[in-house]
Image (cartoon, helix red, strand yellow):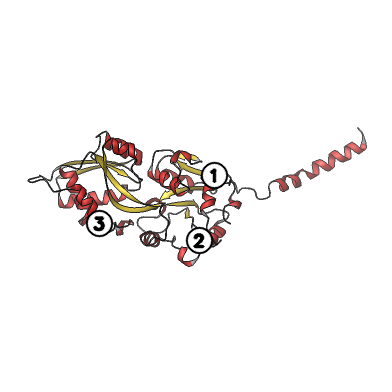
Amino acid sequence: MNKSFLFILIVCILALPLISCAVTEKPGTGMVVYTRSDACGASDTWASYLGGHKQEDLLGTGVNGDPGIAEAVRQDALGIGYNNIGYAYDISTGKQVDGLMVIPIDINENGKIDPDESFYNTKTEIVRAIAEGKYPSPPARDLHLVTKDNYTGITREFVRWILTDGQQYVDSMGYIALPESKIAAGLQKLGNSEAGLKMEGTINISGAFALYPMMGKWGEEFQKLHPTVKFNISAGGAGKGMTDALGKMVDLGMLSREINPAEIEKGACWISVTRDAVVPVANAKNPYKQEILSKGMKKQAFVDIWISGKIIDWQAAPK
């Protein structure tokens, strides 16, 4: 073998580790993007925030349900997703769910999280920010209960109670009370009570994960007043809630997005009952955690992650 060739070959072999290091300057920072696989209001709301898009425009690995996407990000140090605040914050402590980091949004886009943009540590803080209009809308939004054609019987009285006495439980559950104008509009849509109505029977409800915890509390409190009224409540996404309601498979569908014209033509009748928001989340062990918390992420960064796919590495996310 030619000695010169042998020398070059040895040099190349010895240089391989250096070449590898040069190519992978920051190993282990590739972003893993998650989205929802089920038809849901959270995705529609998040997509709308990112420039008027729809759920089907969002990139990422599809995961079913709010609990599913939260767990996927919790288990992935490089993961990023979005959750309703009821699944990003612990309902008991009000703190961010263990293993998750709610990503602060650099709303004024000055490259840092200013004091008036810093409201993510606890559920109480972000709920106040939503109520005061500091957190953008979308992804803050109203939550609705939908039925086919009109509200009747004990279902109507339950919704009427939600809009009146039931509003007292909203704050303790980490949701935002509706303004009086929307409550008045909802009560007008319900109309008068039925004379001689017996408060007994079962109210079947399905739909948005976002509204599920609040609906459970409302059902529990209403049942204390009317023990002969039973509830059958299940989550499954806003799409399921609308489909079930229009098909009369349930009395009420829980919805966490706007109602579209086609659904209105099919008889969808809805009433807003409370308010919450969708927030971006990452793993609490993210390699750029401190930079993300101090700088936040701009709206365009989220667009480049979920819509265009331009950002694929965490190094490019906080700017």
Label 1 SS: strand
In this view, the mark in front (3 or 2) = 2
**297, 101: nearer the viewer:** 297
Q: In this figure, which residue is indicated by the disc labeled 2?
A: 108
Q: Which residue is drawn at 45% across and 38% down?
A: 56
Q: Which amino acid does label 2 sit on?
A: Asn
Q: In this figure, which residue is indicated by the disc labeled 3?
A: 167
Residue 153 vs 295, above or below: the answer is: above
In this view, the mark in front (2 or 1) = 2
Label 3 SS: helix
Label 2 SS: loop
The earlier-in-sequence mark between 3 and 2 is 2
The earlier-in-sequence mark between 2 and 1 is 1
* Relative to 201, 84 lies left or right: right
Q: Quadrant of the N terminus?
A: top right
Q: In this figure, which residue is indicated by the disc labeled 1?
A: 32
- Disc 3 to disc 1: CB gap under 8 Å: no
* Relative to 316, 92 lies left or right: left
The CA span between labels 3 and 2 is 33 Å
Quadrant of the image occupied by residue 69: top left
- Disc 2 to disc 1: CB gap under 8 Å: no
Q: Which mark is residue 41?
A: none
The CA span between labels 3 and 1 is 39 Å
The CA span between labels 2 and 1 is 26 Å
* Relative to 184, 236 lies left or right: right
Q: Measuring from the top left, give residue 26's x and y in whole percent.
A: 65, 50
Q: Which amino acid does label 1 sit on?
A: Val
Q: What residue type is labelled 3?
A: Gln
The earlier-in-sequence mark between 3 and 1 is 1
Q: Measuring from the top left, give residue 291's x and y in whole percent.
A: 57, 59
